[in-house]
Amino acid sequence: MSPRGRSWVQKDVPITLTPEQEAWLQSQVATGAFASIEEAARQLIDERIAECNLEEDDLAWAKPLVDEGLAALSRGEFVSLEEHKARSAARLAALKG
């Protein structure tokens, strides 16, 4: 099992590093940031994959929420910042008794 609880098959895939990449990875291993160059490569690749997945999220799920908020705004259903602060201060004062 992988650290994330999913099963996987380990397969060696040779990669070629630039001297700079190898030196950086070796320095990270030397400082204890990673147990090995292989672990560092796996973790860094996993992090980049996660970043790419976030970049691909088009936020289509949020459109209905934004539309709902804009419709409420156009109907005048909003609270000014000043009113919000006043309401919050009143609630806090009531809680303090």
Image: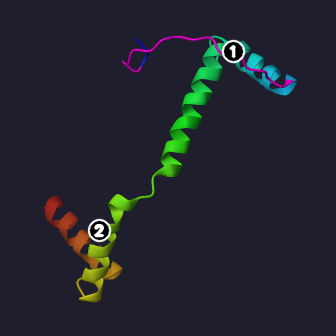
Colour convention:
rainbow
Location of the C terminus by quadrant is bottom left
Q: Is residue 19 visible?
A: yes
Residue 1 in picture, x, y percent from top left: 40, 11
Instruction: Tell me which residue sits at (45%, 57%) in the image.
Output: 58
**Any magenta on residue 46?**
no
* Mark 2 or mark 1: whose residue is earlier in sequence: 1
Left or right: 76 with respect to 19?
left
Category of crowding for the residue at label 2, using alpha-carbon neighbours closer than 10 angstroms: few (below 14), some (14–19), many (at least 20): few
Instruction: Give me the residue at 34% from left, 78% from top.
Output: 81
Please report the bounds of the magenta region as a residue range. 4-18
The spot of residue 91 in percent (x, y) is: 18, 67
How crowded pointer 1 is (Cα within 10 Å; few <14, some 14-19, many 20+) is rated as some
- Number of labelled discs? 2
The amino acid type found where label 2 is placed reads Pro
Is residue 16 found inside the magenta-colored segment of the image?
Answer: yes
Q: Is residue 7 above or below residue 48?
A: above
Is residue 15 found left or right of 42 in the rendered image?
Answer: right
Q: Quadrant of residue 6?
A: top left
Residue 13, percent from left and from top: 65, 15
Give the secondary structure at mark 1: helix
Q: Quadrant of residue 23?
A: top right
Q: Is residue 97 above or below residue 23?
A: below
Task: From the top left corner, tell me how far across and down residue 72 is, in percent.
Answer: 25, 81
Which mark, by number, is residue 37?
1
For mark 2, what is the residue? 64
Where residue 46 sits, quadrant-wise, is: top right
Question: In terms of secondary structure, where does tag 2 sit?
Answer: helix
> Magenta stretch: dominant SS?
loop
Q: Type of residue at label 1?
A: Ile
Instruction: Please report contact status of discs 2 and 1: CB closer than 8 Å, yes or no.
Output: no
Identify which residue, 83 or 26, lies in the foreground: 26
